[in-house]
Structures are given as C-alpha cells and as structure tokens.
Image (spheres, rainbow, N blue to C red):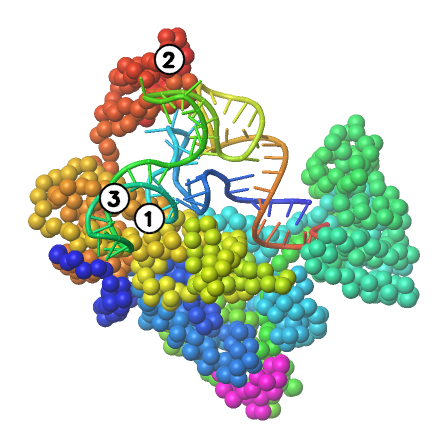
Amino acid sequence: MSSDTRFDPASADARWQNAWEEAQTFRADSDSPKPKSYVLEMFPYPSGRIHIGHVRNYTMGDVLARYKKATGHEVLHPMGWDAFGMPAENAAMEKGVHPGGWTRDNIEHMKAQLKRLGFALDWSRELATCEPDYYGHEQALFIDLYEAGLVYRKESEVNWDPVDMTVLANEQVIDGKGWRSGAEVEKRKLNQWFLKITDFAEELLEGLGSLENWPDKVRLMQENWIGKSKGLEFSFDLSNGEKLPVYTTRPDTIFGASFVAVAADHPVAQAIDSEEARQFIALCKRGGTTAAELETAEKLGFDTGITAKHPFTGADLPVYIANFVLMDYGTGAIMAVPGHDQRDFEFATKYDLAIPRVVAPSVEEAGKRFDGEAEAGEGVIVNSDFLDGMSVEDAKREIIRRIEEQGRGQGKTVWRLRDWGVSRQRYWGTPIPFIHCDACGVVPAPKESLPITLPEDVDFQTPGNPLLRHATWKHVDCPKCGGKAERETDTLDTFVDSSWYFLRFASQPDDRPFDAEEVAKWLPVEQYIGGIEHAILHLLYARFWTRALAHMGRIEVKEPFGSLFTQGMVTHETYSRKKGGKTVYYAPDEISREADRALLTADGGEVEIGRVIKMSKSKKNVVDPDTIIDSYGADAVRWFMLSDSPPERDLPWSEAGIEGCSRFVHRLWRLFAAHDAGAQGEDKALDRKTHQTVAAVADDIEALGFNKAVARIYELTGAVEKAASSASRSAAIRTLVQLVAPMMPHLAEEAWAGISMDGLVADAPWPEVDPALLVEDEVTIAVQHKGKLRDTLTAPKGAAKEDLEAMALASEKVQRSIDGAEIRKIIVVPDRLVNIVT
RNA sequence: GCGGGUGUGGCGGAAUGGUAGACGCCGGGGACUUAAAAUCCCCUGAGCUUUGCUCGUGUGGGUUCGAGUCCCACCACCCGCACCA
C-alpha cells in the first residue's frame, strides 16, 4: 500500500459505517451454528443528546462485541430506547410539544449520533418502549402476571410528588424528596397496582450467590435492599386486655426488656384518647426524614400508661409511643432492650428506665456496668433465668421454642423489601390494561383489545394525569357484562419497561412478547454493561421479572444477566470565577488551557481550575460527543474512552488526552501505510512480541481491562516502528490492524483495504497465536543482595539453579555489595531472580 | 452509625509475594524547517559526595531471603444504606 495521505476520519468513518450497513455485518442470526454471545449495554433514555457517558458505555460493549465476533461467536448486540418517562411530559408542559413527537425526534437525533461512532449494533432489532408494538406486549405480560397472582391492587399510602403530581416508589424518594423534582414528598392514600416482588424475596436473595460475575458491591447492595432478618414475633398481653405483637431479632435478650414501644401511627398509639398523645403523635410525623435530621434526632417517647406483661418474668413493662419505631417494618412495635440496642439505650437513659445486662463477655462479668452505650456484640447470656450461660445463638433457639410452645408467637423472617408499586398518574407510560366496572369490579382488558394505545389529543397545560381528563379515552364497555365501564387511567412505572426489553431484543414476534425458543438461544446476556446507579432498582426488577416469567413457565432462564459490569463516569475539571459572591462556571470550549492555568478566551483573564468531577450541565464541565467527533473522528474518541483509566473507575476527560489519541490514530496510519507485502526475512524477536501481544490483548478484552489492552498495543506499535523491514514486520502490521479493529474500526477497515486483505476486517477472525512464540528463550534475572537489586543478568530460559547462582556471584556489582561478607544462603527463583543473603 | 471501596511520580495509571513507576498525558532538551505546524530522537520519582549510593507505593507495626501486593492497628477520601428492632 502506498499512500502518503493522512487518515481522514471525516470521509472514512461514514464510508465504513455504510459498508457495514450494506453488508449487514452486525446482524445477529439466531439460526447460526456458532456459539452465541449476547452483549448488552443499558439502553438509553432519549433525553435529546447522547452524552459522553453513553459513549464510554457503548464503546466498551462494542469492543467486546467485535472481539466476540472475531473469536467465532454469533453476537447479538442490540440497541433501543427506554422511551417513556417524565422528561417528555415536562418538555410537553414547557414547550407545548407532544411527548411522543419530542421523544421520537430525540431518538432520531441520538440514533444518528450513535451511528457516527461506528458501533457494531444490530439495528434491525431496534425498539422503543413508547411504541405500541412494544408496550402492547407489556400489557399482555402484565395481564399474565395478574392471572398468575403476581399483580394486585390495594389502597395504600403512597409517596406523592406534588410537583410532578405522581406517585413515587420508595426507591424514588431520596431523603424525603422526589428523585426527579426534588420536591418534599407527601403521604396520600390511593388505590395502587402492585407487583408481588416479595414473593420472590428469598429467591432473589439466594440467586445473588450464583452471580459470580457481578461486582460484589452490587450484590451486597441488593442483599441489603432485600434485607432479610430472622427473629421472633410474639405478643405481649396488655393491661387494657389487648394483645400487642412485637418483632425482635434478639429474642435471646428478652430478659433484658425494660419497656415496650410502638410507632406513632400504631393502632395502640392512635387509640390513646388524650390531647398530649395526639400532640406527641403529630410531633413524630412532623420530624424530618433527611439523613442529617435522623442522625441527630433525639429519641422521644410518650408514656401511654398501658403496661405489657413480660411473658417469662411476669413484670409489667411500660408501653411508650416512640419516634424511632417505624410502622412499616416488623409489627410496628418492639420490645426494647436498652442494654443491647443503642436506640433503646438512648431512650432508656433519657426516660430513666432500667438498663439490665443480659449478655456479658463471660459469666463472671454478669454485673459489669455499661460504658455509656449499648453492647450489641456476641457473648454469653446472663441474668436471664433458664438462659444463663447459653450462647446468643442457643438462647435465640430456646426462646423461640418456648414462645412457640406457649402459643404466644413464632420464629419469623422479616424482609425490608416491599412489593413494587407500579401505578403512575401519568400520561407518558404504558396504559395499565384493566377496566373498572361497577358491576364486575376490576376486569383485565381482553388480550385481543391490546395494545391499548395512548390517545394523541391530550393537553399538558394542567398538572395531573391527562388520561383522566380526556373526553372519551377512558370510557369503554365492560368486557364481562357489556355495561358502561372505565379504563384504568394510571400507567406503568417505566422500570417495568426496562424489566424485559432484553427478552424482546432476543426475539420480536408480532403476536406475542417473545419467542421462548429464541430467548433460550440467546439468554442469559453474556455481558451486561451500565452505570452503578442501576445497581438496585433496574437490576433487581429485571431479575424479578425474569424469575416471575420462569415461574410461570414462559422461559427457562432465571437470571437475565450472566455477567454485569458497572463502568465509571466520565469526569472533567471545572472552570469558574467568583462574581459578587456567586460562582460563575465556564464551559471547556470557552477556555484555553495552559500547563498550570486556564484562561477565558473571551477576555484573556485567568479562571480558577476546580476539582475533576462528574460532568453536569450546572457546572458546565461537559463535552459534546458530536463536537469532538467532528474534530478528531470516531476512532480517536473511542480510543480515549478505553485508554488510561480502568473501566470501572472514573475517566477524566482532557483536551490533551484526546489530542494524544488523535496523534496515535495518525501514527498508526503512517505505520499501516508503510506495510510492505513483499518484505523478506524473519525477525524472531518481533514475532514473539506480536504473538505475546495478541494473547495478552485477548485476555485483557475478555477481562474488560481495556486500559491494559491499549497499553500493550502502544508497546507493540513502538516495537514495530523500530523494527527493520522483514516479513515478520509486515505480518506484525497486519496483526496490529486486527488488534485495533475492535477499538478503532474505521481506521482498521481503511488499513485492511489498503493492504489488500479480503473482505472486512470486522469479519476477519482474531489472529492465531503460536504458543511456541509466547515463551522467551532468554530471560532477565534480577540479582538481589540484602533484598535490594544489585544487578541484572541475561540467562537462557530454564537455566539451572547452580548456573544462575554462579553467574550472580560472578557479577562485579554483586561482589562489591557483598564486600567479603559470609554468604549464609542463596535463594534462586528459576527464570526470575537470585537473592544472596549474608 | 452500619456496610463497601480506594490510597503508587506533576497527572491518568502498570506491576501471578520476586527488577516499583509499563503505557499514555504534561514538562524539558535536540533534529528537520527561512519560520511554524506536523513528525522524529533523547531526558523526565526524590535526594546525594553521581563508574555509583541512599530514600521512595497514605501512617505505624508485623510475617518473609524478599512486601505496593499478605496480617494487625490507624489516617484520609469516595460510594451505598440508614432510628429496619
């Protein structure tokens, strides 16, 4: 190939993108006999523009997908749009556009942006959750779940976001505020649809154990979220004749109970007929729920005057209303053991209640005083009648046995996980396919009436749900009795949409949500890549949905994502100035960056360089993918996304960095252009380096260690550049084209064509590795004396210990270091080092 | 508070218990050029009495012939959860 022209991404990128599209290079064939590989990145919300975080996410997946294809796999690498959600309605309210039009325009724009990056995607499987051919199937699945007993309705207190005028899931309430609007969340009672995720709590928890290729962090977060705890539920007999069930995880400490406490909204509390009680309850409800407030919140109580009889001692324990007891966990009432629970300790201290010790380090220390705080640790049971001397575990079993014997209660497992409320009082979501009939109650819509589509003629100038206000949409005949009835006007939480899209990608029949056989071919997803922000919600819901479908016999697979990878964010330094007490931020393109300072282009004055933080519009530290692709081409951008930072860590964006990447693209191009097909001669050392690099890069990509693969490619490039012309060098150049192909596919195709190789490099198999070339025949041996490096020497691989020892002792530098001292010991690690101990 | 993670040059980071700093960025010097850009070459952890030596992976201990890596204690930062009985 002879060309002294520069690589021109502006023309090459589009040309090869078209070539792949025409050849349908990345179309997944489910009938292929090859082993299947399903590579999936979390599909984007069509907010309007692709941001740099998407670019990093999809570049990683793309390298893996292309590598998998090269290594003989049939790859499914699809893309779609998580297209329902509130921003579309917000845009509708602000700009007077229709959410559908807004969303579809965004999709079109973002799709064009993704195409510019040359991702190896099977666009024939593209889907958008806002289209009836997706959400209609979701409605069918929802009805199926209903018929399987996994969907129910109940009136419940919900988190009401007064700004977005909608219900939020617990997970969407952060510090008492709506996750999107930031508004203070109110409590309201509404009839809501729920999915019975709690039926699967045990399974979802146990299933985590099988997910070895998930980050421990995510598994732990899910484990905590599911929150299994084992304990005892039993009832106290109250002085007013009623029974009060309480829940405890420490039944072993029952002899240490000195009072009983109920939540402010507990029926026992509500029944107290006194002004003070009502005031106290109101006070509890007013208490803030932010992290800071909770941390400093004082333990407060109100003595009800009622007493509870201790089931073993018969003592009368006072019953308090306490602000730290939660109604929605356990039974909303506790037996308080101040000696061994910190909250109870603080409460007892404040109200001067007894703090008995019932667990001690040893029997002898049964009288030990508390040192200002509760002791929640292990030990031996003391001051507890028949439990004395037992271990905590034995005592737990014994108390549960006795309570069960008395018929007063039983051992019980309590979960933190709540059922998943999916109703949203919103327009831009999947209509819930049910009909309310005065005569027949709640009736599922007939399957043949699906999809129940959203009406187009809606207005967004009034807050609240447009479906509820629409003149005709909700009025239908009851499918059962034919009488007048109304549609459900709530729509589904968008997390439902993303709970099964990976099944729809695998197969897209018109008449049903998915084809079980096709799903079996592709699932589980071999590698799922996305942000850590979905560690709990999306990933737990998708796991639940998959298990629910498996439970119903619809699919075989129980866990949808075999391996999960959570990539780090793209960050950037900030530029700002203080202006009259306010901080004004400047965008990177308004700045000219010098070695140790940054100047504002507009006035030439200096601005402050701030911390490297996550890109955000408010700090203006964003870079736009389109702009940088315009300047450097897709391959340089992709290369940057893979370089330097390990993929799970944050990647600091820098102008210098992307320029370095761009330089490397052109440097490679010059090397490729110098390829000499007719070169003769062997260069054994270069052959070794080439084969070692191929093997190492393969390992790195499989481990998603892209930064290491990049470093190795730099090394090989340097070695090839330095090598003299030979057949080995030409072979190394061809190999290099293939090694960079997953990362810089446009440059690689251009070079592949330039060196007259057949077909597309995207279709070429991964270079073969000759195992014989992976081992060196000479090794460098480190020689240490007193644990420090004194000299290095070159020896044939596999040299005998004695020979290495002799060579080491022959070294002048080593002799000088030993300086006549007596040699006590010589440690020889073959092919590695010799350590002389004196 | 509980749980988890991270700490290595000016920066991003490499390093199966075995030559710390691969590779990239920044910086310095040089070549080419009328000049610049581009490109190429060299240097680039700190210190010193510079054929070489000493120190150096958050801090302090320990195990080992040998520790960035293993163990113990601590410090700092980041993330998650949070009156969950």
Residue with the mark numbered 1: A710
Mark 3 nearby-residue class (10 Å; few <14, some 14–19, many ≥20) = few
User: Hey, what amino acid is under mark 3?
Assistant: Gly
Mark 2 nearby-residue class (10 Å; few <14, some 14–19, many ≥20) = some
Q: Where is residue A536 in the image (x, y as percent from the top left)?
A: 55, 58
Q: Give the range drawn in magenta.
A: A450-473
Residue A261 forms part of the magenta stretch: no
The label shown at residue A818 is: 2
User: Relative to residue A309, is residue A140 drawn left or right?
Assistant: left
Q: Which of marks 3 and 1 is nearer the N terminus?
A: 1
Q: Which quadrant: the C terminus of chain A?
A: top left
User: Relative to residue A36, is residue B45 drawn left or right?
Assistant: right
Task: Give A568 or A259, whichever is nearer the viewer.
Answer: A568
CA gap, disc 1 and disc 2: 42 Å
Mark 1 falls on what kind of element?
helix
Task: Give A474 or A91, whichever is nearer the viewer.
Answer: A91
Quadrant assignment, res B9:
top left
Camera sees residue A502 = no
